[in-house]
Image (cartoon, grey):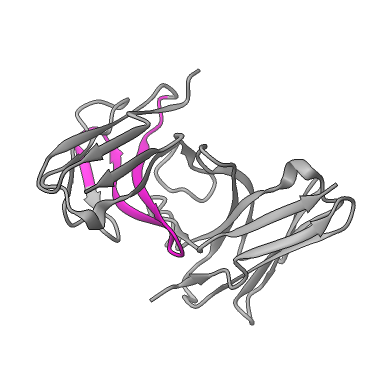
């Protein structure tokens, strides 16, 4: 199993550009989520999904869109990049939707810089 | 409003000694707590967890203690090894009877350095 795979590893965007961060998992996990990590802030939840076709907002959803058309994939779209979106982005999945007894498995992250 | 706080940005410990990482929370609805470990250029990996119905959980060299009245948890690593050098995040969950959808709230992280 590859686990949770994120692409690209690094990306530089200009303000106003759009892009999609890819995330795929091969563990047949029901729950997937996106976090961003910023210095001094820990990881903050952007969006999450409890199954194909079901998504919801997390703590910091503004400026991001998600969709979940398959169990395996959960892409994160930046509609119009802003310097405030410079961060490291982590995709995570867990076997069931409830989290407590099913810890999150994280990808290795995408480091995004917006100039 | 930081609901989960790790007030020590860094901790330095000698190999073989005990490492104690601390975490405080403000939301009394949190009922499940986890620790994650993160190496540079990798994603966090799950280390150990504890339910609010317990006050201690042990897994090998790692023990998590929960003090609900103080809203405080700690991770003890004994003995510490150089390979334990990493960033440690505590995280909390309001399981809400099984409807929380795994929405973890993370602390800021503590950088642990274990010197040989």
Give how far across and how far down residue B107 sits, in percent: 51, 63
In the rendering, at what x and y percent does residue B91 appear?
52, 59
User: Which residue is nearer to you in this view: A92 or A21?
Assistant: A21
Q: Quick one: which residue is furthest to the top in this view?
A: A1
In this picture, is A88 found above or below A74?
below
User: As drawn, which residue projects farthest toward the front?
Assistant: A115
Foreground pick, A102 / B36: B36
Horizontal arrangement in the rendering, residue B38 relative to residue B74 (left or right): left
Query: Residue A84 appears at what percent x and percent y?
Result: 24, 58
Locate residue B56 relative to residue A99 in the image: left or right. right
User: Is residue B91 inside the magenta stretch?
Assistant: no
Task: Out of B115 and A29, give the one closest to the viewer.
Answer: B115
Q: Residue at x 48, y 60 (%)?
A: B106
Q: Residue at x 70, y 47 (%)?
A: B85
Q: How many numbered discs, if any?
A: 0
Q: Residue lying furthest bottom in this view? A: B69
**Main secondary structure type of the part rendered in magenta:** strand
x and y, in percent, of residue B99 in the image:
37, 55
Residue B54 shows in this picture? no
Q: Is residue A17 visible?
A: yes
Report the quarter where the N terminus of chain B lies. Answer: bottom left
The span shown in magenta is: A28-55
Q: Measured along the vertical axis of the image, is residue B77 above or below residue B71?
A: above
| Res A38 → quadrant | bottom left
A65 up-or-down from A63: above or below: above
Identify which residue is drawn at 46% across, 48% down.
A99
């Amino acid at each position: 199993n590859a686990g949770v795979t994120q692409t690209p590893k690094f990306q530089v965007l200009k303000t106003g550009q759009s892009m999609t961060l890819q995330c795929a998992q091969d563990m047949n996990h029901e729950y997937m989520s996106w976090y961003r990590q910023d210095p001094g802030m820990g990881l903050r939840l952007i969006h999450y999904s409890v199954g194909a076709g079901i998504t919801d907002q997390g703590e910091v959803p503004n400026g991001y869109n998600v969709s979940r058309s398959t169990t395996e994939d959960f892409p994160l779209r930046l509609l119009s990049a802003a310097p405030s979106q410079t961060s490291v982005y982590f995709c995570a999945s867990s076997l069931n939707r409830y989290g407590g007894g099913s810890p999150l498995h994280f990808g290795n992250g995408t480091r995004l810089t917006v100039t | 409003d930081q609901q989960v706080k790790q007030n020590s940005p860094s901790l330095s410990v000698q190999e073989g000694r005990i490492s104690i990482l601390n975490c405080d929370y403000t939301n009394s609805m949190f009922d499940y707590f986890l620790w994650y470990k993160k190496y540079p250029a990798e994603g966090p990996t799950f280390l150990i967890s504890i339910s609010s119905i317990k006050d201690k959980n042990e897994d090998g060299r790692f023990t998590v203690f929960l003090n609900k009245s103080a809203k405080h948890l700690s991770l003890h690593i004994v003995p510490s090894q150089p390979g334990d050098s990493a960033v440690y995040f505590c995280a909390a969950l309001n399981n809400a009877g099984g409807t929380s959808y795994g929405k973890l709230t993370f602390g800021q992280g503590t950088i642990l350095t274990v010197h040989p």
